[in-house]
C-alpha cells in the first residue's frame, strides 16, 4: 500500500505576500512612550507612607525637644544655685568680718619750687617743680590686713601734671595708720598751649592753684590664713589749694588741705581696658 503525497497549503517562500514584503521593507517606527523610564501603569498602587515611620519620626523630634528643654532647665537651675551659694557666702563673710575700704587723708602738701619758663627760639613752655606730700592710710577693719604694692603718685591741676613720684610697698595691719611721705619733682616738662593757658589762669586765683593727688596701686587682702588675689585701686584726693612760691629764694609754700577729701575706687582690668 503506497503513501499519498499531499500538496503543502503554505505559500512558496519565493512568492511572499506583497503586504508582508512592504511591511518588512518599511522602517521600524519606535514607540515614543517606550523611552520613558517609568511609564504610567494604571494598575500600579499609589505610594502611601508607613504610619509606623511617621510615629518614629515624631518620637525622635519629641525626644530632641525634650532633651533640649531638660538641658536648659538644669542649666538655669544650676546657675541659680551657684548665685544663691555665692550670696550666702558673701553674707556670711560680711557678718564675720564686717569689711571696710581703706581710708586715706592728706596730711600736708608743700610746694618747694614752681617755675614756668618760655624758650624764645621755639616758643615752648617748660615746667619745673618740686612738691612734697604726706598722706595717711588707715585700716578700719579688725580682722583684715591690707597688703599694698608700690604706688605711683601724681599731683595735677585740671589734668595738667605738676609732678610725679612713687612710694614703696607696705602692709597695713588692722586698726593701724600708715604714713605715706614722698618728695616728687618735675624737671623741664614741655607743656602744650592749652595747659599753659589753664595754669596761668589758675595761678591768678586768690585761694591758690587747685590741685589733686592721684595714686594707683595693687592691694591684696589677708584674713587669718586666707589670702585673696590683689586688685587694682585708685585713690583720688581733691579739694587742695596752694600758693606758688615766687623768685629764686622763695620760701616753700604750704597748701591748704583742710577741705581735702580722698576717694578709693576699684580698678578692674578686662583685656586692654581698665574701669
Image: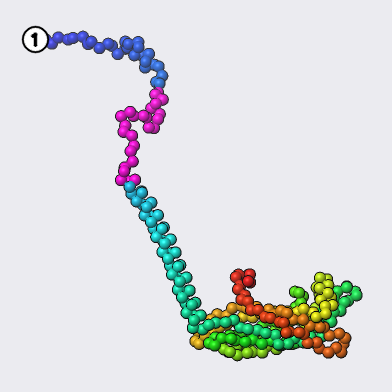
- Compare residues 46 and 246 and report the one nearer the observer: 246
Would you say 75 lies left or right of 181 here? left
Question: Closer to the camera, 110 or 240?
Answer: 240
Q: Where is residue 123? Give x, y as percent.
A: 88, 73
For the point 86% across and 79% down, the residue is: 117
**Residue 73 higher or lower than 161, as above or below:** above
What residue is shown at x 40% (from left), y 29% (from top)? 35
Q: How is the image coloured?
A: rainbow
Residue 166 position in % (x across, y down): 70, 84
Outermost residue on the right side: it is 120
Residue 271, position as x, y percentages in the image:
60, 70
Label 1 residue SS = loop
23 in relation to 275, above or below: above
Give the residue number, with chain letter if any, for mark 1. 1
Res 15 → quadrant: top left
Q: Relative to 146, does residue 87 appear above or below in the rendering?
A: above
- The quarter of the rendered structure image containing the C terminus is bottom right
- Camera-nearest residue between 256 and 75: 256
> Does residue 175 appear in the picture of this structure?
yes
Dot 1, how many residues are within 10 Å of its Cα: few (below 14), some (14-19), or many (20+)? few
Q: Is residue 226 magenta?
A: no
Q: Is residue 187 visible?
A: no
- Please state the extent of the stretch shown in magenta in the rendering: 30-54
Q: How many marks?
A: 1
Q: Quadrant of residue 28?
A: top left
Pinpoint residue 1: horizontal percent, then vertical percent: 9, 10
Along the line of sight, which residue is nearer the eye, 102 or 22? Answer: 102
Query: To which quarter of the image does residue 120 belong?
Result: bottom right
Give the residue at x 82% y 85%: 113
Is residue 60 shown left or right of residue 254?
A: left
Which residue is pictured at 78% across the width and 87% down the height? 254
Amino acid at each position: 500500500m503506497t503513501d499519498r503525497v499531499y500538496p503543502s497549503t503554505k505559500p512558496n517562500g519565493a512568492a511572499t505576500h506583497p503586504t508582508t514584503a512592504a511591511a518588512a521593507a518599511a522602517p521600524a517606527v519606535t514607540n515614543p512612550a517606550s523611552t520613558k523610564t517609568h511609564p504610567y501603569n494604571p494598575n500600579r498602587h499609589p505610594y502611601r507612607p508607613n504610619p509606623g515611620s511617621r510615629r518614629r519620626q515624631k518620637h525622635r523630634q519629641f525626644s530632641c525637644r525634650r532633651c533640649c528643654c531638660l538641658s536648659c532647665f538644669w542649666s538655669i537651675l544650676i546657675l541659680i544655685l551657684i548665685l544663691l551659694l555665692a550670696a550666702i557666702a558673701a553674707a556670711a563673710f560680711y557678718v564675720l568680718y564686717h569689711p571696710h575700704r581703706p581710708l586715706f587723708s592728706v596730711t600736708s602738701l608743700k610746694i618747694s619750687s614752681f617755675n614756668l619758663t618760655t624758650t624764645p627760639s621755639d616758643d615752648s613752655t617748660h615746667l619745673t617743680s618740686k612738691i612734697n606730700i604726706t598722706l595717711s592710710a588707715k585700716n578700719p577693719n579688725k580682722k583684715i590686713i591690707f597688703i599694698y604694692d608700690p604706688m605711683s603718685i601724681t599731683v595735677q591741676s585740671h589734668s595738667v601734671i605738676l609732678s610725679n613720684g612713687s612710694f614703696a610697698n607696705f602692709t597695713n595691719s588692722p586698726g593701724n595708720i600708715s604714713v605715706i611721705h614722698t618728695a616728687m619733682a618735675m624737671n623741664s616738662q614741655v607743656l602744650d598751649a592749652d595747659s599753659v593757658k589753664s595754669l596761668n589762669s589758675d595761678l591768678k586765683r586768690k585761694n591758690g592753684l587747685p590741685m589733686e593727688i592721684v595714686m594707683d596701686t595693687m592691694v591684696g587682702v589677708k584674713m587669718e590664713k586666707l589670702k585673696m588675689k590683689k586688685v587694682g585701686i585708685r585713690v583720688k584726693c581733691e579739694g587742695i589749694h596752694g600758693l606758688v612760691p615766687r623768685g629764686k629764694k622763695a620760701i616753700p609754700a604750704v597748701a591748704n588741705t583742710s577741705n581735702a577729701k580722698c576717694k578709693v575706687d576699684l580698678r578692674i582690668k578686662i583685656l586692654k581696658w581698665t574701669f
